[in-house]
Image (cartoon, grey):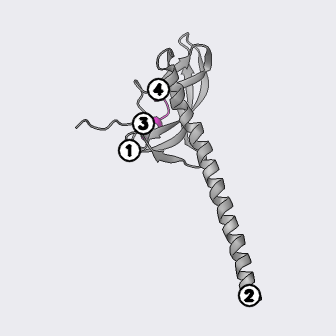
Amino acid sequence: MWFETLLWVVFAVVMSAVIVTAISVVIVASRENRIYSAEEKTWKRLAQHGIPAEAIVESVKRSEHELTRGGSQGQTVLAVEMSLKVFDGAGGASPAVVRTLVDEALLPQFCIAGTRVHLLRDPDDASSLAIDRTRTPLEIARAAG
């Protein structure tokens, strides 16, 4: 009788650990997804009134937890952190970090240091940047048909 009780206690402890772990994974994944999806929302906001800018890629890193998800075209997109050198148009440059989601098929082109990237900058906040997807695509569109 005591053995059965012990088994139920062990089961309860193990299941509690599984539930806590699952909740932790969901929280971390949601937080990371929100961080890397924010850049696209910034781009949509700046698409009408953003100031065009250019940058070069200095380095690219995968997200801390290697977040991947389905993209808008059904492909896999990867969360990356791009370290950029942003040119201000007056001959100066400043560093910036952009966290975004990139189609896995396009990722290699961003991994080459010196790759040119087109940005949109917020006219009221120069630190608010987004990749201009009309000039530097981050996803490959589906073929029509």
Residue 31, quarter of picture: top right
Classify mark 3: helix, strand or loop. helix
Give the farthest residue toward the front. Answer: 1
The residue that disc 1 covers is 74
Q: How crowded is mark 1: few (under 14 residues within 10 Å), some or many (20 or more)?
A: few
Q: Compute the Cα span from label 1 to label 4.
A: 24 Å
Name the residue rendered at 61%, 13% in the picture.
124
Q: Residues within 10 Å of mark 4 (few under 14, many from 20)?
A: many
User: Per the image, is 110 magenta?
Assistant: yes
Q: Give the number of the disc on residue 117.
A: 4
Q: Check the picture and name the quadrant holding the C terminus.
A: top left
Classify mark 2: helix, strand or loop. helix
Name the residue rendered at 49%, 44% in the picture.
78
Q: Compute the Cα span from label 3 to label 2.
A: 61 Å
Indicate which disc, 3 or 4, sits on the residue closer to the N terminus: 3
Magenta extent: 108-116
Q: How crowded is mark 3: few (under 14 residues within 10 Å), some or many (20 or more)?
A: few
Q: Where is residue 5 in the image (x, y as percent from the top left)?
A: 74, 83
Classify mark 4: helix, strand or loop. strand
Indicate which disc, 1 or 3, sits on the residue closer to the N terminus: 1
The residue that disc 2 covers is 3
